[in-house]
Amino acid sequence: MPTTPTAPETGPEPTETRPTSTPGEVLPGAPTAAAELARVAAGRAAEVLAGPAPVRLDDVVPAPEQVFPDPAGDFTLSADAALRVSPAGRDVAEQLATWLRPATGFPLPVADAPEDGPLTLTLSPSAPDAAAAPANRATDDGSGGPGDGGLGSEGYRLDVTTTGVRITAATPAGLFHGAQTLRQLLPAAIESPTPVAARWAVPGGTVVDRPRFPYRGAMLDVARHFFAVEDVLRVVDHLARYKLNHLHLHLTDDQGWRIAVDSWPRLAEVGGATAVGGGPGGWYSRDDYRRIVAYAARRHVTVVPEIDLPGHTNAALVAYPELAPGKVAPPPYTGTEVGFSYVDPADERTYAFVADVVGEVAALTPGPWLHLGGDEAFKVPAESYRAFVERAQRLVQATGKTVVGWHQLAPAGHVDGRVLQWWGTNGDDPETADAVRRGARLIVSPANHAYLDMKYAPDTPIGHDWAGLIDVRRAYEWDPGTHVRGVPAEAVLGVEAPLWTESVSTRAEVEYMVFPRLPAVAELGWSPRATHDWQRFRSRLAGHGPRWTTAGITFHAAPDIPWPAFSSPSPSPIPTPRPAPETNPR
């Protein structure tokens, strides 16, 4: 069972102390206008002598839609700074302060106040919807300068001047994404968990930004190897850092059932006791799952639970043999082959099981999606498979959730809103294109570009190569909007990067496979296609190496990225090459 989670990406709360004065500085609260002018003049002189901010305004990942640098507008965060925020955006401001306090040592109090301050977060719900504005508009008024109309549900505008930083958005999600951009615009030392003596400079100018696709996600397979709650929370933080907004949890498979279901308790108690290689297994209680969902929601990440059916069900059959076609319990499975197990599609007891499970999981999940799996049910006859899927889809729909499933669901009858997740390696897929013509939308996860469990190179110590080797360039150089032939861009809901864990068993190994490829997929999902440029991306990505090192994030020092010399990852528990597990055709 998971241990009590600790909050990732936070540091000790610094003691709130007032700064002491230095030559040329006047302490906050000085009574005269002359003293205030002297303080400002001294600060500006120091900034001129210190040079420009070490990060450029266009160094952000994912690339913003519009960037308007102002080299004369750099801002320096001082010890007496406070965050001013619209009341509805206070939680975002509190999170931003939590990110900045450990390294700066500044108290950074948060106040509900409409007036500008050094850091101001403003909600403007009246901003027009993004759909009402041109997608690549230069300005609102045609003058060529930045505008902030049409920010939509996740967009933001960030303005940096010598006197302060303002983030404006129509929603808290937009404010949150803007705060993540501000975080990247500060020096890499901002990721330190302890105070650092540094000039906390932000490059001047304006960013106007919003996402290309509404669905941008990653998947963590917790079924093959179980990951404790605190590990999942850390993955949520990684997604949020790069403006990904969905975490798909693969909760059930042959090797383990990872979520408690009150009406079928042996699913977790028995089915959750195993893992690949004979590991100890584990599962999430209802409170564990609620904690993951709530933690993600605060970071504007939606959890997408997957209950894989009708195949990939050996763990469920061990717990409840009456679900098996022969009504005999199979032995627990700790290997990595696929396609051999399935629930009995001809037994009404199976559908009572499906209704109970998806009903309980849906009730615990505030997001709109519930993933049915549906792939690699090789031993189920085609007609029986189709009938099962059509009935299971209706059971999910009855919970009020929208059905998501792997693209093998395509031949089954359509239900309103259905989303197919495409994981093929050949973009020519007539069955999926036909399902889209019947109303389905698509999440694109090509295994030979987006699967984070594929090796970077032949000598990568963990991972697979059945879909090919995926270096950072291969993860970046494809277009979700045009990848599946016969599927128009408007039918593409978004992009997702799955991490299957047959060969991945620790937090460090998760991070090693995720970084640096996750930011590449994140940019495909967020940034306008016109901004995609490999050479520029690899240069921007290189600057994140020092951030990951400072934050204690394990990553692969990919040779195709020009990392700064000081950003090499510290020694980590990534194993030496070990025998590859049995091939998984997924």
Image (cartoon, rainbow, N blue to C red):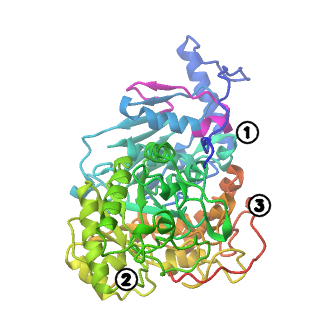
State which region is magenta: 99-119
Report how far apart the C-alphas of labels 3 and 1 lie in the structure: 24 Å
| Percent coordinates x, y for residue 268 in the rendering | 51, 56
Q: Mark 2 points at which residue?
A: 380
Q: Residue at x 69, y 44 (%)?
A: 192
Question: Which of the 4 image quarters holds residue 171?
Answer: top left
Q: Which residue is drawn at 46% across and 70% down?
A: 313
Disc nearest the viewer among 1 and 2: 2
N-terminal label among 3 and 1? 1
N-terminal label among 1 and 2? 1
Task: Specify few, some or many for label 1: CA neighbours under 10 Å numbering under 14, 14-19, or 20 or more.
Answer: some
Task: Specify few, some or many for label 2: CA neighbours under 10 Å numbering under 14, 14-19, or 20 or more.
Answer: many
Residues at marks 3 and 1 touching, judged by CB atoms closer than 8 Å: no
Q: Name the residue under label 1.
A: 196
In the rendered structure, the answer to whether residue 339 lies left or right of residue 402 reads right
Q: Name the residue under label 3.
A: 572
Q: Let me know if residue 101 is in the magenta part.
A: yes
Question: Which of the 4 image quarters holds residue 217?
Answer: bottom left
Q: Which amino acid does label 1 sit on?
A: Val
| Percent coordinates x, y for residue 485 in the rendering | 32, 85
Task: State the SS at label 2.
Answer: loop
Q: Residue at x 35, y 82 (%)?
A: 484
Task: State the SS at label 1.
Answer: loop
Task: State the SS at label 3.
Answer: loop
N-terminal label among 2 and 3? 2
Q: Residue at x 71, y 20 (%)?
A: 20
Q: What residue type is labelled 3?
A: Ser
Disc nearest the viewer among 3 and 1: 3
Q: What residue type is labelled 2?
A: Val
